[in-house]
Image: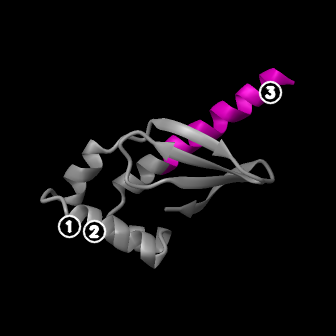
């Protein structure tokens, strides 16, 4: 039903925003565990191109969902003023971040 689809969309968007906030609260050592090498390099370059620290850069980012694009088993999320995007998949009733770029 349409109502159930709206509930699912709100749930996964809330999860995406929370996962984004957790990443913004992380430091580079923690991000090394979460991101692949290329994406981490891209994020570090973004910080290096900006004279501010990671904390200042993360303060200027937003975890408000700008756009979501459903794929096969996952949904790709793009954030307002974000430097990364993430794919989220629902498995056995739980949400997981399966890719960050």
Q: Are marks 2 and 1 in contact (CB under 8 Å)?
A: yes
Q: Earlier in the sequence, mark 3 or mark 2?
A: 3
Query: Was residue 11 drawn as part of the magenta stretch in this picture?
Result: yes
Residue 80 falls left or right of residue 50: right
Q: Nearer the viewer, residue 88 or 30?
A: 88
Q: CA distance from mark 2 to mark 1?
A: 5 Å
Q: Residue at x 40, y 67 (%)?
A: 31
Highlighted magenta segment, given as a residue range: 1-19
Q: Residue at x 57, y 37 (%)?
A: 14
Marking on residue 4? 3
Q: Residue at x 58, y 63 (%)?
A: 99
Q: Position of residue 84 (x, y in %)?
A: 43, 55
The residue that mark 2 highlights is 45
User: Dominant secondary structure of the magenta stretch?
Assistant: helix
Q: Nearer the viewer, residue 96 or 52?
A: 52
Q: Earlier in the sequence, mark 3 or mark 1?
A: 3
Closer mark to the observer between disc 3 and disc 1:
1
Q: Residue furthest top?
A: 3
Q: Are marks 3 and 1 in contact (CB under 8 Å)?
A: no
The residue that mark 1 highlights is 48
Kind of element beneath mark 3: helix
Kind of element beneath mark 2: helix
Query: Was residue 84 drawn as part of the magenta stretch in this picture?
Result: no
């Amino acid at each position: 039903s349409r109502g159930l689809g709206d509930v699912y969309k709100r749930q996964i968007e809330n999860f995406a925003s929370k996962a984004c906030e957790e990443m913004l609260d992380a430091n580079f050592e923690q991000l090394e565990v979460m991101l692949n090498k290329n994406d981490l390099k891209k994020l570090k370059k973004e910080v290096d191109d900006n004279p501010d620290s990671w904390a200042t850069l993360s303060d200027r980012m937003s975890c408000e969902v700008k756009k979501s694009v459903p794929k096969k088993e996952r949904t790709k999320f793009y954030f307002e003023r974000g430097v990364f995007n993430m794919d989220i998949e629902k498995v056995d009733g739980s949400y997981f971040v399966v890719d960050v770029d």
